[in-house]
Image (cartoon, rainbow, N blue to C red):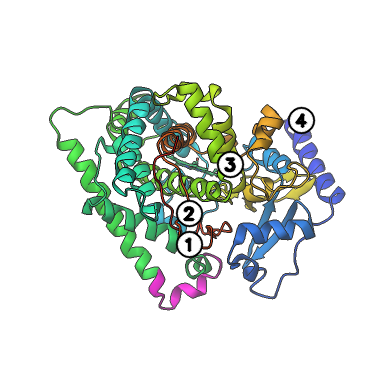
Amino acid sequence: KCTEAASGLLHHLCRFLTRSSSPGLPGPPSLFLIGNMMELTHEHLPIHLTNLARRYGNIYRLKCGNTTMVVLNSGEIIREALVKKWSDFAGRPVSYTGDIVSGGGHTISLGDYNEEWRAHRRLVHSALQRCCQQSLHDVIERQALHLREVLMDYRGSPVDLAEDFTVAASNVITTLAFGKEYGKSSSELQKLHSCLNEIVALWGSSWISALDSFPLLRKLPNPVFARLLKEVAKRDEIIREHLNNYKSQNNKTEDAITGSLLEGLERNNNTDHKRLTDIHVHMATVDLLIGGTETTAAWLNWTVAFLLHRPEVQAKVYEELCTVLEGRYPKYSDRRRLPVLCSLINEVLRLRPVAPLAVPHRAVRDSSIAGYFIPKNTVIIPNLFGAHHDPAVWSDPYSFRPERFLEGGESSTRALMPFGGGARLCLGESVAKMELFLFTAYLLRDFHFIPPENEASLPDLRGVASVVLKVKSYTVTAPPPSG
Ligand code: HEM
């Protein structure tokens, strides 16, 4: 009892000392009722939050309704919260609309941190690992070759490749998830896509986020919210159909993730006291399809856009591919022998982390970051875009210079954090890394990306930021490399 009392006293003393020794968090003036809501409706939120860091420092607060958000803008501070103090900040904010899109908090990405969530993440992680070991390389190679055929068919005419990149990335994840590939014109694929895209876009809109901060607005008619509900219902119907199809197959295989998840469910429920159910498999499938499509596709589209601005980088990668591979197609195991290609991949991940603000975290208990007291339930925004543009870490941070990774070596790579970190590290990191490497290597081996002749301007590199940071649409020609 004495030890308990002493440790309680110590805890309160520590809390008091952190609170009193740290002045209040800086931040822009907060308006009555709406707080800093206007700051959050900025057109390019990651750039805006990064600019605010130049004024208020690498950690500052924003108020939205009765929620306090703390924005972290440097690698060091983000690592302190997400990695060093991971157990303090592994939660997700529970929100009215988040609950709707995550089937009552049952996705991994939006589910709050608790025993059930841990069992869920473990189950999906091991199913994903198992399928990746068995088939990921083959699946990506097949899709890379398929993408090559699609580009060949354009015969060097100007095209916007965004949709082709989405189909390629989506086919990797649907093959892993369901053991099923779709063609570009498959209506089933288009239905799934448009519905998942709509959900991400609508959920990211301020019409929807306002409902979380201002409950009174839920009483008013809101057509955007009605559309969100409709798309969520459509999504659930499509996934349910896939899962039912799988269950009714006679010779089920565990090659596909859903199969592995359903089998794992049985095993898990025999050994783990936290019961996982079909809803967990259903929502994990949603996680993988959403997490695994637009991110990779957006990254590929950024890469081509940057290469159009610096053709000499493309020439260097091509030269390296020719010398090292001597005509054959690359394997993921070649990556250490292809440093120029890897520097390109890292530089695009640095400049355009496709999930620029990660996913908001929540303090599950009172804690501190950078010496500031952070009370339980504070929402934490890791501004990965800001960390990747921090002038204290990156020289000339806004320039596209893949060479920096060749000059800076391992330490530059360690400063990158496009996949977040700690307990909430991107679940698809290894899938994504293999995809980025193989797709880029296949594309740059067989095509020379150049701007269409009649177009005066190169792609706009500022981008459009929602949940995913995308490049504005542009056209490109992709004939085979000459010589
Ligand atoms: C979460 C980045 C591809 C599935 C995240 C987070 C980031 C991220 C920053 C949030 C981490 C946090 O909350 O701190 C990326 C990037 C990708 C990519 C840059 C590609 C270039 C993928 C792929 C998949 C995937 C291919 C699926 C196969 C997920 C899931 C989560 C997540 C399920 C939620 C994890 C959790 O809350 O525990 N990703 N991702 N991602 N990602 Fe990715």
Question: Answer yes or no: do the residues labelled 1 and 2 have beta carbons within 8 Å?
Answer: yes
Mark before the other along the chain sequence, 4 or 2? 4
User: Tag 1: residue type?
Assistant: Glu
Q: Distance between the residues labelled 4 and 1?
A: 77 Å
Q: Nearer the viewer, mark 4 or mark 3?
A: 3
State whether residue 348 is above or below residue 100.
Answer: above
Under circle 1, the secondary element is loop
User: Tag 4: residue type?
Assistant: Cys
What are the residue bounds of the magenta stretch? 212-224
Quick check: is 221 in the magenta stretch?
yes
- Is residue 320 toward the left or the right of residue 194 in the image? right
State whether residue 323 is above or below residue 19.
Answer: above
Q: Please identify the quadrant where the N terminus is shown.
A: top right
The circle drawn on residue 455 is: 1
Which residue is label 4 attached to?
2
Tell which of 78 and 149 is nearer to you.
149
